Image: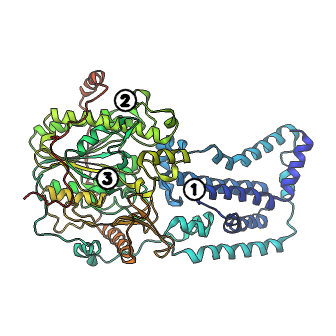
């Protein structure tokens, strides 16, 4: 760049830095708003974001008599970082990020592939001015000795202090007026759009209060059941049908319910899961209930029957307590309890979670090693093969066991190695999340089929109750572009919406105990798994506070949601309800995806759902603290296991036959039929 032109640029920036940087920040505000908020009015960022920015710029004009440009650049960089973080977090989670997400920073490197996959090139325009500034400063200093002329221009005494005082006062007043009327808003996204992104971030700092806890004496099972409308029969259907059996809970990574029975271009995506659905109890109207912790939150909810915390992941908020749990319930009945996951146990603070839940032992990457690594650790094939060996060993010892198996290979962004891609998809799926997701879930299903065959061959399957479910959403609505939305609509037959996004399958099987039955319309969530298992295994829950219900007994349900959908969201009847600033301006979505198929959600149901969340949080926070000495045993491979693993890996078949169907004559029973006596 020629010296004359460079000096002219310096003068333009330096003579009016307040105006210059205001224009830049307004552009960045518009970019963030266009990504996050639909149908953004052109004036909204101007009214919501600029007053906050001007208040900071006034402080620079007052107090930065030296290095003023440096101050502007630092503020520019900081606010740019906030806007970019908000954009990326929204694309991944669908929520407006706040400072509380800083506890996730150590997880970012582990999910960097997922983060990079969500970056649209135009997002990077938000940093374009910073790149230019760096170039100008370096180029001016090195070539023309002019690198600090801009600093001198910016550092001249401010002769308009009175004007700045007026701008500052007006900006602060407007910020307060943007914030105060919306502090009671239930919907965080609506709250951020009304306050403005920067005001919302500031408000989250000053409004971070400890939630008022409900007295423990008020938190009773009767109170919870009354809020949910639960009726406990003297003798429940299916009570004790799996009593005394081993329990194997398989948590499938990112598995959504629309995959069940889905054929794409003549190919079954999940043939093994489809076969399992035809053999056991299947709940198609089942929903995830996780939050910031995703997979680890699912482990928490399923094993406790409590809801996730109001802020943050359960693994960060609740693990200082001695949590009542399914492992503890089974342990007192003579069961060995163990959990399997190929990632490091430190990921999402599972070290503390497993201790809080009372597991006897855990198996993590130190046990599974790095063989056939995909994303965070060893593949599902390695997970299942080594887990089957351990379960056979436990089964031979004659003591019943509870094993939780957490799969992981079908993780976002779903980009598998070529040797694991099996589906032959047309070009329209190429380069899309949808295509990659189908491939990843097909591989996960294939690996699951091999696991089931292995368990049967080892004699473990026949003596076990198997519970399988999806842990959380795989394809968030807000991460998909128009092309991907159209592909999904073509696959599922209607527009892909919020209800489809959080709908995951639940399947229960047990040879000689459970028969094929499809519980159509039986609404459930992950919080219901523990009481349903307890019913099948004849485990009384007297004295055990739980927020779920036995899905084999109850027809109706009330499912509060958090995080992936705004606070105050609930599922009941045939509807998903998402509040606006409150109940009155909320929106109903039909669970079926068909317009007009929704049922009314009353304000009473809305208030009861909120009360359930308050009761759960209050109960957990008042549980006794966990002893630091209480910790599960970390399992390591035996010395000769490594060589054996290599040998087995070389002979591992590429394909596994689908799980055998139950007798073709057995028809699916409807939910209205009575259970056998």
Residue 626: in sight, yes or no? no
Residue nearest the viewer, comparing 65 with 162: 162
CB atoms of marks 1 and 3 within 8 Å: no
Position of residue 133 relative to residue 599, above or below, is above
SS at badge 3: helix
Between 676 and 625, the residue placed more toward the observer is 676
| C-alpha distance separating marks 3 and 2 | 25 Å
Question: Which residue has dot 2 on it?
Answer: 372
Q: Quadrant of the C terminus?
A: bottom left
Cα separation, mark 2 vs mark 1, equals 35 Å
Label 1 and label 3: CA atoms lie apart by 27 Å
Q: Secondary structure at mark 2?
A: loop
Of 299 and 462, which appears nearest the observer? 462
Locate residue 110, reporting x and y percent.
46, 42
Tell me the residue that label 3 is attached to. 299
Q: Split into 4 quadrants, where in the image is the N terminus?
A: top right
Residue at image location 54% in from the left, 44% down from the top? 483
Q: Look at the picture and state if 306 lies above or below 343.
A: below
Residue 287 shown left or right of residue 399 in the figure: right
What residue do we see at 15% from left, 43% from top? 665
Residue that numbered label 1 is attached to: 86
Other residues around mark 3 within 10 Å, as few (<14) / some (14–19) / many (≥20): many
Q: Residues within 10 Å of mark 2 (few under 14, many from 20)?
A: few
Q: Quadrant of residue 137?
A: top right
Q: Quick check: 163 left or right of 218?
A: right
Residue shown at 35% from the left, 64% from the top: 574
- Can you give x and y, in whole percent of width and height, for residue 171 in the image? 71, 72
């Amino acid at each position: 760049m020629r010296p004359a032109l460079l000096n002219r640029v310096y003068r333009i920036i330096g003579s009016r830095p307040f105006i210059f940087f205001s224009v830049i920040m307004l552009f960045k505000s518009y970019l963030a708003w266009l990504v996050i908020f639909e149908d953004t009015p052109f004036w909204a960022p101007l009214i919501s974001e600029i007053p906050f920015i001007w208040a900071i710029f006034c402080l620079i004009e007052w107090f930065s008599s030296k290095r003023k440009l440096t101050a502007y650049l630092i503020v520019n960089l900081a606010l740019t970082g906030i806007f970019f973080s908000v954009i990326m977090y929204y694309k991944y989670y669908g929520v407006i990020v706040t400072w509380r997400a800083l506890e996730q920073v150590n997880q970012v490197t582990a999910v960097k592939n997922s983060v990079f996959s969500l970056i649209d090139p135009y997002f990077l325009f938000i940093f374009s001015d910073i790149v230019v500034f760096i170039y100008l400063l370096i180029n001016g200093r090195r070539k023309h000795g002019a690198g600090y002329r801009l600093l001198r221009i910016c550092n001249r005494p401010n002769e308009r202090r009175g004007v700045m005082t007026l701008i500052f006062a007006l900006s602060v007043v407007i910020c307060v007026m943007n914030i105060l009327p919306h502090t009671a808003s239930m919907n965080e996204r609506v709250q951020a759009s009304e306050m403005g992104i920067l005001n919302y971030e500031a408000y989250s700092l000053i409004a971070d209060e400890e939630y008022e806890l409900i007295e423990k004496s008020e938190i009773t099972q009767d109170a919870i059941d009354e809020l949910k409308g639960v009726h406990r029969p003297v003798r429940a259907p299916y009570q004790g049908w799996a009593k005394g059996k081993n329990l194997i809970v398989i948590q499938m990574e990112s598995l959504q319910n629309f995959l069940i029975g889905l054929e794409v271009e003549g190919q079954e995506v999940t043939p093994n899961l489809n076969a399992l659905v035809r053999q056991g109890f299947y709940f198609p109207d089942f929903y995830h209930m996780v939050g910031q912790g995703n997979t680890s939150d699912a482990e928490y909810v399923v094993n406790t029957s409590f809801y996730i915390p109001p802020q943050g992941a359960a693994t960060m908020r609740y693990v200082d307590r001695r949590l009542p749990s399914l492992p503890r319930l089974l342990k007192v009945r003579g069961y060995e309890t163990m959990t399997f996951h190929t990632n490091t146990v430190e990921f999402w603070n599972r070290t503390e979670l497993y201790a809080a839940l009372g597991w006897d032992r855990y198996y993590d990457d130190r046990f599974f090693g790095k063989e056939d690594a995909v994303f965070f650790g060893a593949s599902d094939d390695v997970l299942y093969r080594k887990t089957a060996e351990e379960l056979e060993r436990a089964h031979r010892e004659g003591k019943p066991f509870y094993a939780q198996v957490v799969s992981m290979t079908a993780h976002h962004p779903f980009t598998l190695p070529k040797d694991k891609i099996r589906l032959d998809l047309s070009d329209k799926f190429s380069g899309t999340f949808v295509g990659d997701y189908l491939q990843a879930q097909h591989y996960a299903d294939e690996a699951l089929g091999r696991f089931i065959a292995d368990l049967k061959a080892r004699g473990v399957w026949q003596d076990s109750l198997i519970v399988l479910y999806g842990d959380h959403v795989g394809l968030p609505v807000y991460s998909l572009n128009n092309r991907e939305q159209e592909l999904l609509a073509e696959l599922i037959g209607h527009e892909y919406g919020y209800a489809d996004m959080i709908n995951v399958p639940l399947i229960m099987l047990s040879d000689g105990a459970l028969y094929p039955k499809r519980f159509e319309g039986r609404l459930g969530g992950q919080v219901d798994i523990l009481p349903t298992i307890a019913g099948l295994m004849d485990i009384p829950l007297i004295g055990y506070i739980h927020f779920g219900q036995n899905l084999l007994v109850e027809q109706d349900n009330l499912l509060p949601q958090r995080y992936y959908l705004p606070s105050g969201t609930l599922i009941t009847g045939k509807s998903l309800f998402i509040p606006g600033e409150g109940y009155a301006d909320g929106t109903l979505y039909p669970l079926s995806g068909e317009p007009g198929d929704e049922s009314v959600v009353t304000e009473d149901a809305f208030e009861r759902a909120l009360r359930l969340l308050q009761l759960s949080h209050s109960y957990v926070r008042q549980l006794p603290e966990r002893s630091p000495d209480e910790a599960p045993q970390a399992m390591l491979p035996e010395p000769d296991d490594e060589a054996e693993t290599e040998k087995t890996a070389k002979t591992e078949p590429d394909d596994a036959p689908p799980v055998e169907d139950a007798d073709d004559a057995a028809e699916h029973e409807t939910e209205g039929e009575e259970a056998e006596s």
